[in-house]
Amino acid sequence: MQSIHLPLSPVVRMGFAGVVFGACVLVSLSQIAPAWRIVALTILLPTGWGLWRRYRVWRPVTLRLDADASISCMLSSGRTVRVQQVLLGVLNPSLVCARLVGRGGESLDLFVTAMCIDRESHWQLRRALIAWRPPPGDKVAGSELADRS
């Protein structure tokens, strides 16, 4: 069993703040009526803040890679989630982006830049996500169709 520690990188922090700030600027500069701009901004800012808080609580802090190619995550809240499904996004030498789905249907967003962990750990993380297999005895969503064939 191997563990990969995933610190919260400044790139993710600044990227999230940049997306929310950019959306606020675009709404502010839009051609809609000023009253609707204020309504949109009062919805946009608390929504962005809530999403950031949710990400901070549900963020994977440590990934445990087992010998049977299964993955479990330690969350920043202290819970451990066994991954039932991996939905790959971007896997390249500078960024790993994936959604990990747990047994209870929890979806965990994984954003790992090459700057926040060492090169070897980043490579092992990419390999583990590509080689991921569901734990023995677990049913993956959509696998019942394969069973009927």
Image: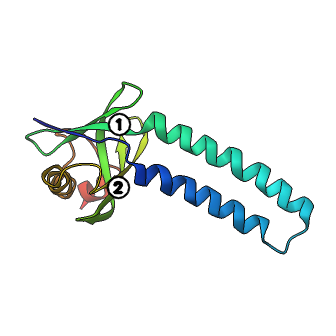
The circle drawn on residue 43 is none
Residue 20 is left or right of residue 130, and the answer is: right
Q: Residue at x 37, y 47 (%)?
A: 9
Name, please, the residue furthest toward the bottom. 31
State the image quarter where residue 127 is shown. bottom left
Q: Which residue is mark 1?
A: 103
Disc 2 versus disc 1: nearer the observer? 2
Which residue is at the front of the view, 90 or 38?
38
Locate the N terminus by quadrant: top left
Mark 2 or 1, nearer chain start: 2
Q: Secondary structure at mark 2?
A: strand
Helix, strand, or loop for circle 1? loop
Query: Mark 2 packing: few (<14 Cα in 10 Å), some, or many (20+)?
Result: some
| Amino acid carrying mark 1 in the image | Arg
Closer to us: 103 or 74: 74
Looking at the rendered image, the quarter that the C terminus falls into is: bottom left
Colouring: rainbow
In the depicted structure, whether residue 96 falls above or below residue 92: above
Cα gap from disc 2 to disc 1, whole angstroms: 16 Å
* Residue at 70% in and 49% down: 45
How far across and down, in percent of the image, does residue 6 sit? 29, 42
Residue 98 marker: 2
Residue 79, by quadrant, is top left
Within-10-Å neighbours for mark 1: few <14, some 14–19, many 20+: some
Would you say 93 lies left or right of 61 here?
Answer: left
The residue that appears at 22% across and 46% down in the rendered structure is 134
Amino acid type, label 2: Ala
